[in-house]
């Protein structure tokens, strides 16, 4: 049995070039290549976000997400660019990634809801984490998405 992922929060100025490259490559491998979706992943928001990186025992980036502070893209803090490498899926790392993101939102933005624009096929997964669907499905870059909100926890 392999060891799990080691999680690390990184603010943009603290990224070392190799970790940043590995995270952006993982996002490109999944969002552009695997999902066959040509879109601008680098949308200018990354420098204003906190990033959660999951590394394997060899230090390779296998998962990540970004936490967009409130007022940048939405009124509420938002979790986005959620990605888990194929070899690490199905073992609970997506849930662990989201749990870490939700905890960081609660710590840095207490008593605020959390916004998420999620792929529609993952809607039940996000619901299991306390998110509620707040929009009808819409296409974003050719993939069905829904807006979701996790109510503020008091």
Image (spheres, rainbow, N blue to C red):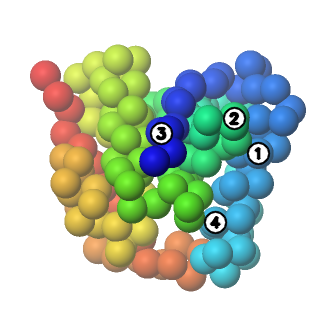
- Rendered location of residue 56, percent (x, y): 60, 40
- Rendered location of residue 129, percent (x, y): 23, 48
Q: Are marks 4 and 3 in contact (CB under 8 Å)?
A: no
Q: Are marks 2 and 4 in contact (CB under 8 Å)?
A: no
Q: Which residue is mark 4?
A: 30
Q: Marks 2 and 1, how far apart in space?
A: 10 Å
Q: Marks 3 and 2, how far apart in space?
A: 11 Å
Q: Which residue is mark 2?
A: 59
The residue drawn where x is 41% and y is 35% is 101
Q: Nearer the viewer, residue 105 or 29?
A: 29
Q: Are marks 3 and 2 in contact (CB under 8 Å)?
A: no
Query: Residue 23 is drawn in which quadrant?
Result: top right
In the image, is 123 to the left or to the right of 36?
left
Q: Which residue is mark 3?
A: 4
Label 1 residue SS: helix
* Mark 1 vs 3, N-terminal side: 3
Position of 2 relative to 122 (above/below) = above
In the image, is 4 to the left or to the right of 91?
right
Q: Which residue is mark 1?
A: 22
Q: Nearer the viewer, residue 30 or 134?
A: 30
The residue drawn where x is 29% and y is 74% is 136
The residue drawn where x is 34% and y is 67% is 122
Q: Nearer the viewer, residue 80 or 10?
A: 10
Q: Marks 4 and 3, how far apart in space?
A: 20 Å
């Amino acid at each position: 049995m392999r060891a799990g992922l080691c999680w690390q929060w990184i603010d943009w100025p603290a990224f070392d070039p190799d970790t940043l490259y590995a995270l952006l490559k993982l996002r490109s491998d999944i969002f552009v290549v695997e999902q066959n979706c040509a879109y601008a992943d680098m949308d200018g928001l990354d420098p204003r976000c906190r990033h959660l990186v999951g590394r394997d025992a060899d230090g390779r980036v296998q998962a990540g997400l970004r936490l967009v502070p409130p007022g940048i893209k939405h009124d509420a803090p938002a979790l986005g660019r959620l990605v888990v490498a194929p070899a690490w899926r199905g073992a609970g790392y997506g849930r662990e990634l989201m749990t870490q993101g939700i905890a960081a939102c609660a710590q840095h933005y207490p008593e605020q809801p959390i916004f998420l624009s999620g792929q529609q096929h993952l809607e039940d997964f996000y619901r299991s984490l306390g998110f509620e669907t707040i929009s009808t499905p819409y296409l974003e870059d050719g993939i069905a998405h829904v807006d979701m909100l996790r109510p503020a926890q008091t």
